[in-house]
Amino acid sequence: MYDRIQKAVSFIKNRIEGFRPKTGIVLGTGLGSMGGEIEQVTTISYSEIPHFPSSTVESHKGELIFGYFEGVAVVAMSGRFHYYEGYSMEEVTFPIRVLKFLEIDLLIISNAAGGLQAHLYPGDLVFIKDHINLHAQNPLRGQNDERLGVRFPDMLKTYNEKLNKKALEIAEKNEIRAFEGVYVGTQGPNLETPAEYNFFHVIGGDVVGMSTVPEVIVARHMDMSILVVSIVSNRCYPIEELDETTVEEVIRVVNDTGEKFVRILKELIHTTN
Ligand code: HPA
């Protein structure tokens, strides 16, 4: 894998010439339009990059966007890979490995998620402070390559506390509803039964989604600083109040809410981690 990462990295470095992004942003479902907020230097389609998987979900575009966000050099992944699409865990997390070797030290991940607390409504933002991994497969399974990270990464300080605190302060100042919470990562692609939503609530979850956890584990393995924001797209608790959820509705809510996240990020990006 190390060699495949290096091949992808040298291809990208050649294409971006002297451009050196320090922050990576993973644009989740419905947030692709945020790419438009970046003053673009260049874009590279996933299909051009050696060993990169290619995108299959229609709401995801499948390109790396290099440019300046509020004057800060960034690279954004417009389109990510989900385990439920059939990719292996190694494929799902390969782009994160590549970002690390492009010398990204801060990884910002966004996603759409169901709210597991009664106070969470569609359009709320939840900055993730911890997670519960319910994926059956782990991206670090198999022989460990010490050039990538240690065999048994500690997960106590996975999420950057300082950035979460700052994000919440910016949200409050802008009168944006935002919270901190625990992300429950499931495999999908089906949504959950009422009993499952209730279980996730009981075990300490605040939001639930089908992405992010594999990427976070790999980013932690490589000692990156991590900020995750979930956009609540549907209510999953209390179970007496559940409505059916469609992907169209999830995308609509995230599209409508993306702007709030962008507003916070515009200030947050200047906070050094
Ligand atoms: N469950 C799992 N993943 C999700 C949900 C949900 O309710 N909403 C958005 N992503």
Image: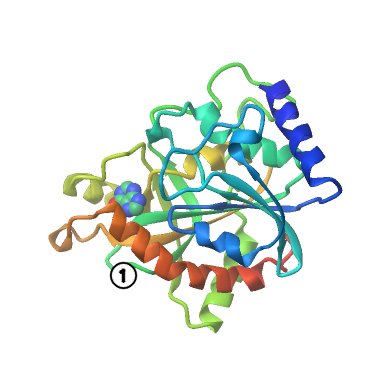
Q: Nearer the viewer, residue 197 or 45?
A: 45
Is residue 214 shown above or below 209?
Answer: above
Quadrant of the drawing holding the N terminus: top right
Is residue 81 shown above or below 59?
Answer: above
Secondary structure beneath label 1? loop
**Residue 271 picture location, percent across and down:** 71, 67
Specify whether 119 is left or right of 15: left
The quadrant in which residue 69 appears is bottom right
Specify whether 37 is left or right of 245: right
Give the residue displayed 53% in from the left and 22% down from the top.
141
Ligand 1: does it lie within 8 Å of the C-beta at label 1? no
Q: Nearer the viewer, residue 43 or 87?
A: 43
What residue does disc 1 label?
119
**Residue at the right extreme, as displayed:** 18
Quadrant of the drawing holding the C terminus: bottom right
Is residue 88 shown above or below 29?
Answer: above
Residue type indicated by callout 1: His
Q: Nearer the viewer, residue 9 or 268?
A: 9
Give the residue displayed 43% in from the left and 27% down from the top.
137
Residue density around tag 1, few if under 14, some if 14–19, many if 20 or more, within 10 Å:
few
Specify whether 145 is left or right of 31: right
**Residue 96 picture location, percent across and down:** 62, 39
Give the residue displayed 44% in from the left and 53% down from the top.
29
Give the residue displayed 71% in from the left and 40% down from the top.
100
